[in-house]
Image (spheres, rainbow, N blue to C red):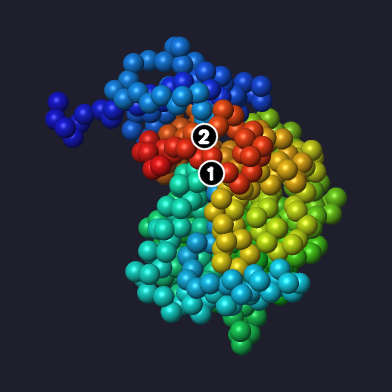
Amino acid sequence: MSASTQPPAAILVTNIGELSTQDQSRGADGSVLRDAAVVFEGERISWIGAASAAPAADVVIDAGGRAGLPGWVDSHTHLVFAGDRGAEFEARMAGESYAAGGIAVTTGATRDASDYELTRLLLARVAEAAAGGTTYLETKTGYGLGVEEERRHARIASTVANQVTYLGAHLVPAGADAEEYTDLVCTDMLEAVLPYVQWADVFCEVGAFTEDQSRRVLQACRDAGLGLRVHGNQLGHGAGVRLAVEFGAASVDHVNYLTNEDIDALAGTWAQGNGVGLGAAGVPGTVATCLPACDLSTRAPLAPARQLLDAGVQVALASNCNPGTSYTSSMNFCVATAVLQMGLTVQEALRAATFGGALALRMHTGKDRDGQRAVGSLAVGHRADLQLLNAPSAAHLAYRPGMPLTGAVWRAGQQVR
């Protein structure tokens, strides 16, 4: 057999004290395994179960009783940028309020950066996230706000990120007519980014895009074949959730200010589901993505994750890594905050940061999708994304907040830490 046709080496990670698989087919009580092991073959998980029953493998790695869980799935980031907004952060901490217009500060620095510099910065940020356990992530455009710049950012992002979202509707550039710019987002700019993106998003908020403008953007992007997401209900009550539900968006993100009607509308997209993250029609509803690091950085009320879960809404946790309001990619921090301040249990927070993110990106199923395997949970056939903690249980992420607990990370079967 030639080297090119050799089967991939089998890698056995064994003696895992607690393995939080987030495998929804096992049910809530069966998704955590004790004294467990996982076998990778190439980028695929080929076996999972009790360490005592593990098959032989080419390479054996002893986890030493440490806790294991899926790699984080970060479903909301803004990583294509240059420049620094530390002064804005200091002013906000001194009492100034956050407004959407701060985005404009980043657009200038990003436009001035070369392709090489933007790619270098993006690679560094993705590597930093991977070192913290993130093995699959989405990132957005939105700091270009012009046809050629949005195309450039989408192209660069597509070479590094797992999925790319078009966010030309992030902010109306200074001096531009809002209606004319919205038309541009829906036509020439959309056409320019289409080869590089899978999703479209709109910042439906006071100071950004109105309900009518947001509806036009979502309609145009859906007609172009893109999946939809919405930045909504971040700065106050508004139309974001309503639009996300109306258009069947995969997620609505931020969700700080929700009415009971908003929560009921989101819950309705999941009504009569099968209990493993699918709605009545056998497909996922609209995920509510909570961004706790952003909430803390802007001193906003934390998103009501507990109320959303109790209503039957599927929740994701994401970093929202960006230069203005959440300059961190630490999903460990987001999980700790969700447990300590948002009322989630440890397993609920883990699910939101893994399987919940995969739901929001529609990467939760066990079948290949465009050549990519399911992420966000550990099961046979899924992508081999695993992290080990330097702790005996995942509870230590909240029990010892801020500690560097990420010990080892595999992404698609390759060890990256």
Q: Are marks 2 and 1 in contact (CB under 8 Å)?
A: yes
User: Looking at the rendering, which quadrant does residue 229 occupy?
Assistant: bottom right
Query: What number is the disc on residue 356?
Result: none
Residue with the most extreme top position? 53
Q: Quadrant of the C terminus?
A: top left
- The correct choice, above or below, for 327 with respect to 70 in the image is below
Q: Which residue is mark 2?
A: 390
In terms of secondary structure, where does tag 1 sit?
A: loop
Q: Residue 228, image x and y in percent?
A: 59, 56
Taking the image as shown, residue 57 lies to the left or right of residue 92, namely: left
Q: Residue 359, image x and y in percent?
A: 59, 42
Which amino acid, by three-letter code, is at mark 1? Pro
Residue with the most extreme left position? 2
Q: Residue at x 66, y 76 (%)?
A: 101
Taking the image as shown, residue 157 lies to the left or right of residue 204, namely: left
- The correct choice, above or below, for 337 with respect to 66 in the image is below
Q: Which residue is mark 1?
A: 404
Res 378 seen here: yes
Which amino acid, by three-letter code, is at mark 2? Asn
Q: Quadrant of the N terminus?
A: top left
Q: Nearer the viewer, residue 77 or 265?
A: 77
